[in-house]
Image (spheres, rainbow, N blue to C red):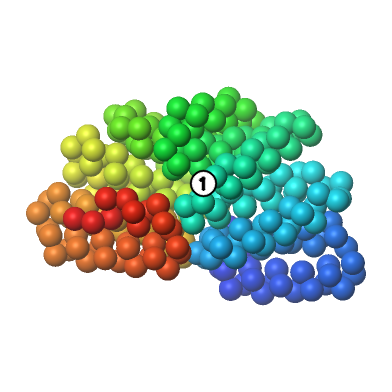
C-alpha cells in the first residue's frame, strides 16, 4: 500500500520488519515476496542500483519456491530499476525472464508486464523496431485496463523516440487520463512528461506546458525522482521554446541534478538535457 502512494519511509519500515520476520522463520517464499516489494520501493524512491540488487536476490530465492507469479514480478522490478540506470542489456534479459514465466504459467498479467518493460528497455537501447513489437505484444496480451494502460503508455514512448510524435500525441493523452485514475501516480507523471516532449516535437508549446506542469506536479507530489527529472527537463525545454531562457536553464539544471543522483546515464547523455 505504501508503495502505491509514494510513502517510501513507511514502505521501508514495514518491508524491513517483514524481511526480518521471514528470515527468522526460514520462510523462503515470503522472503522472496517481500524482497520483490522492497525492489519496488527502491525503484520508486530513486535507488535503482539497490533496487536491481534486491530484486535479483528475490528472483534467486523465488526460483526455488512454487511462487511463479512472484518470481516473474521480481524480474519485472529488476528490469525497471536497470532501465533507470541505463543498463538496457541486463534489463532486456530480466524482462524476457518475466515474460517467459508469465507465458509458462498462463498468467497474462505477468506476461504483459514482462513484454511492455522489455519494450521500454529495447526502446531506450535504440532497438526501436524490436521495442515496438514488444509493446504491441503487451497491448494484445493485456487482460485488463491497468496493464493495458501501462503497455499503451510505453508504446507511446516508443512512438516519441522513433520520431513519430504525432502518433504519440494521439495515443498518450487518453492513456495518461486512464493512469490518473489508478492508485499509483508515478507513471501518470512520467508519461505526462513524455507527452510534453511529444507536444514540443509537433510544435504545440501550450499543450506541452500543460503536460509538463502536470508531470512536475504529479511526480514531485508523489516523490518519484526519475519522473521528476523527466518532468523538469520537459518544463525546461518548454520554457526555452517560449523564450524564457533563465527559467529553462533552472529546470534543466534541476533535471540533470536528479539524473546524476540516480546514475541515469542515458538521460544525462541525452541532448534534451541541455539548452
Q: Is residue 199 left or right of residue 69?
A: left
Q: Is residue 158 above or below residue 18?
A: above
Locate residue 227, reporting x and y percent. 42, 56
Q: Secondary structure at mark 1?
A: helix
Q: Is residue 268 above or below residue 105?
A: below
Residue 248 visible in the current orientation: yes
Q: Nearer the viewer, residue 112 or 87?
A: 87
Query: Badge 1: how crowded within 10 Å, few (<14), some, or many (20+)?
Result: many
Q: Nearer the viewer, residue 174 or 201?
A: 201
Say which residue appears at 39% left-offset and 65% top-offset.
260
Image quadrant in which you'd find residue 30? bottom right
Q: Quadrant of the C terminus?
A: bottom left
Q: Is residue 105 left or right of residue 185?
A: right
Q: Quadrant of the N terminus?
A: bottom right
Locate residue 90, reporting x and y percent. 58, 47
**Circle 1 residue:** 88
Locate residue 61, reporting x and y percent. 80, 56
Q: Is residue 270 left or right of residue 21?
A: left
Q: Nearer the viewer, residue 227 or 93?
A: 93
Say which residue appears at 90% left-offset and 67% top-offset.
26
Amino acid at each position: 500500500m505504501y508503495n502505491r502512494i509514494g510513502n517510501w519511509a513507511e514502505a521501508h519500515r514495514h518491508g524491513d520488519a517483514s524481511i526480518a520476520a521471514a528470515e527468522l522463520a526460514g520462510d523462503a517464499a515470503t522472503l522472496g515476496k517481500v524482497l520483490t516489494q522492497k525492489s519496488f520501493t527502491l525503484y520508486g524512491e530513486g535507488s535503482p542500483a539497490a533496487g536491481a540488487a534486491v530484486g535479483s536476490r528475490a528472483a534467486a530465492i523465488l526460483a526455488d519456491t512454487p511462487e511463479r507469479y512472484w518470481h516473474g514480478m521480481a524480474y519485472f522490478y529488476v528490469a525497471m530499476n536497470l532501465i533507470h540506470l541505463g543498463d538496457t542489456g541486463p534489463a532486456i534479459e530480466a524482462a524476457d525472464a518475466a515474460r517467459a514465466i508469465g507465458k509458462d504459467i498462463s498468467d497474462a498479467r505477468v506476461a504483459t508486464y514482462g513484454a511492455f518493460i522489455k519494450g521500454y528497455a529495447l526502446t531506450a537501447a535504440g532497438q526501436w523496431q524490436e521495442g515496438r513489437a514488444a509493446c504491441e505484444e503487451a497491448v494484445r496480451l493485456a487482460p485488463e485496463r491497468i496493464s493495458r494502460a501501462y503497455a499503451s503508455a510505453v508504446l507511446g514512448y516508443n512512438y516519441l523516440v522513433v520520431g513519430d510524435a504525432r502518433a504519440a500525441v494521439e495515443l498518450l493523452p487518453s492513456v495518461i487520463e486512464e493512469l490518473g485514475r489508478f492508485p499509483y501516480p508515478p507513471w501518470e507523471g512520467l508519461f505526462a512528461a513524455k507527452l510534453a516532449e511529444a507536444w514540443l516535437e509537433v510544435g504545440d508549446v501550450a499543450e506541452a506546458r500543460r503536460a509538463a506542469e502536470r508531470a512536475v506536479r504529479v511526480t514531485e507530489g508523489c516523490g518519484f525522482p526519475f519522473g521528476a527529472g523527466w518532468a523538469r527537463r520537459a518544463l525546461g525545454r518548454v520554457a526555452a521554446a517560449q523564450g524564457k531562457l533563465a527559467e529553462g536553464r533552472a529546470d534543466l539544471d534541476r533535471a540533470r541534478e536528479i539524473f546524476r543522483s540516480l546514475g541515469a546515464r542515458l538521460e544525462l547523455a541525452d541532448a534534451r538535457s541541455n539548452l
